[in-house]
């Protein structure tokens, strides 16, 4: 269900926030502006009202609602976006007062998710999250869906239609959960196979628009969509990364995070985020040029803690340092690595940090592999670093850098050179 660009004309949006002091409303509103742009709409103006509590009927006060209605007429507003979740009653009352379509922050994020999802799993997760959000709001649909009238002759069929819709949604949700369970079983099987094969995984996590896809492309030529938009990438991508010392790791790009991401959205994408939880190394990537860089790092760390990643090595990486101009002293962020995924600055330091945190040690070996076992040379080429090879009368003389797992399988061909890589 596309809520923003259902026609060629660019949707003009008015953003509304009720500031009760429970979070930084100004920062949240700035982020809402970026979300609206990512959805393809134009944020025309923002309205914030300080309140001791949210108005249960209209979200903001009645006087402020009249002001919003006048702004909608003057600015030819097509859409009102609230910075908090709205109840069905609040949505309906704002629509009635302003005669403009109304959505909230969660609906907007769901719409962006639906726009960006490419894989089957991503699409299923988006649909499930949308249905979860829609189910309790069926009776609150406003001007985007025709409302039933009241009185004799309309009540029965109306209630029957709503109950039918609810049953249909619940059945669809069960189907989606079953399909996602099957995908998760397959994902778990792949994880077990990687562990069995000794494949080391390194996940890139971080706030949305931190540059994860750009870094992925820089390191592996993955060809992942990289745009200056929130949630440009939703689907996880895995690519092999060869480290300077010869070891190969599996690099995984994960869905971006955002402040005040509703719980059921995090839950919907939990299987994707668990790729990070199951990884051997985590890269916590942050846009260092953002004024909210430290807050973004905190959001990511809190999520990693909730996923049980306390014992996993985490490398804090500050991206977009080509835009810093010396504004952020390194001590503000603690131990970290400064890079620019765009220009390549600091990439060598990042690769070295990944290598330093590897859960296995590398060994440098000199081997004589008989011709009957020549297939092992290809294993070395794929899983380690083949420094040199020479064909002799006794077989293939090889110098290689391998991990301990591969080293054990090559032990019988070792000619005596055994050094740490």
Image: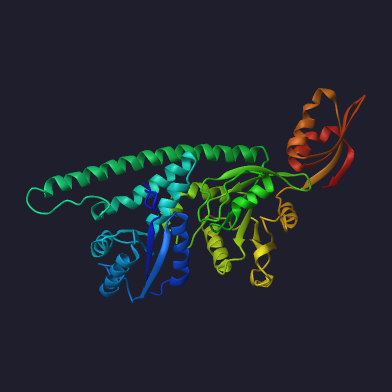
**Residue 258: image location, x then y, percent:** 49, 59
Up the image or down, 116 lies above or below 197; here it is: below
Horizontal side of residue 294 vs 404, given as left or right: left
- The answer to whether residue 280 shows anywhere in this view is no
At 60% from the left edge and 55% from the top edge, which residue is drawn? 211
275 left or right of 376 in image:
left
User: Which residue is at 44% across, 40% downward?
Assistant: 180
Q: Position of residue 142 (x, y in %)?
A: 25, 55
Q: Residue 44: horizontal and vertical position, in percent?
A: 41, 64
Q: Quadrant of residue 404?
A: top right
Q: In the image, residue 42 lies at what x, y percent?
A: 43, 59
Q: Is residue 353 above or below residue 402?
A: below
Of the pair 313 and 224, the residue shown nearer to us:
224
Q: Residue at x 12, y 47 (%)?
A: 156
Residue sitting farthest toward the left: 152
Residue 60 vs 154, above or below: the answer is below
Task: Tell whether 324 sits left or right of 163.
Answer: right
Could one spot residue 124 in this view of the protein?
A: yes
Q: Residue at x 19, y 44 (%)?
A: 161
Q: Give whichever of 263, 66 is nearer the camera.
A: 66
- Viewer-side residue, 283 vs 80: 80
């Amino acid at each position: 269900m596309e809520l923003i660009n259902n026609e060629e004309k660019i949707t003009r949006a008015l953003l509304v926030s009720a500031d009760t002091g429970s979070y930084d409303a100004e920062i949240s509103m700035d982020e809402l502006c970026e979300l609206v742009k990512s959805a393809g709409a134009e944020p025309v103006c923002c309205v914030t009202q300080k309140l001791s509590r949210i108005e249960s009927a209209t979200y903001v006060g009645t006087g402020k609602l009249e002001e919003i209605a006048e702004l909608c007429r003057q600015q030819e507003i097509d859409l009102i976006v609230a910075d908090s979740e709205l109840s069905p009653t609040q949505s309906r009352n704002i629509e009635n007062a302003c005669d403009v379509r109304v959505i909230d922050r969660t609906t907007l994020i769901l719409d962006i998710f639906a726009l960006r999802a490419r894989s089957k799993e991503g699409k299923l997760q988006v649909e499930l999250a949308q249905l979860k959000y829609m189910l309790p709001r069926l009776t609150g649909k406003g001007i985007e869906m025709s409302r039933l009238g009241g009185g004799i002759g309309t009540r029965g069929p109306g209630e029957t239609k709503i109950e039918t819709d609810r049953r249909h949604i619940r059945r669809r949700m069960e189907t989606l959960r079953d399909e996602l369970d099957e995908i998760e079983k397959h994902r778990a099987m792949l994880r077990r196979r990687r562990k069995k094969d000794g494949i080391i995984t390194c996940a890139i996590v971080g706030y949305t628009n931190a540059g994860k896809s750009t870094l992925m492309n820089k390191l592996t030529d993955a060809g992942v969509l990289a745009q200056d938009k929130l949630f440009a990438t939703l689907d996880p991508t895995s690519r092999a990364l060869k480290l300077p010392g010869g070891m190969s790791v599996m690099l995984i790009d994960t869905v971006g995070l955002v402040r005040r991401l509703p719980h059921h959205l995090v839950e919907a994408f939990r299987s994707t985020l668990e790729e990070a939880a199951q990884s051997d190394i985590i890269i916590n990537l942050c846009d260092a040029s953002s004024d909210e860089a430290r807050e973004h790092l905190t959001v990511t760390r809190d999520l990693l803690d909730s996923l049980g990643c306390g014992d996993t090595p985490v490398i804090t990486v500050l991206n977009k340092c080509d835009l810093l101009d010396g504004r952020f002293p390194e001590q503000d962020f603690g131990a970290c690595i400064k890079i620019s995924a765009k220009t390549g600055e600091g990439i060598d330091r990042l690769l070295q940090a990944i290598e330093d945190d590897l859960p296995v040690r590398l060994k440098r070996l000199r081997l004589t592999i008989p011709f009957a076992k020549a297939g092992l040379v290809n294993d070395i080429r794929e899983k380690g670093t083949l420094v040199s090879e020479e064909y002799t009368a006794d077989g293939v003389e090889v110098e290689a850098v391998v991990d301990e797992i591969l080293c054990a399988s090559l032990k019988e061909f070792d000619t005596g050179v055994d050094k740490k890589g």
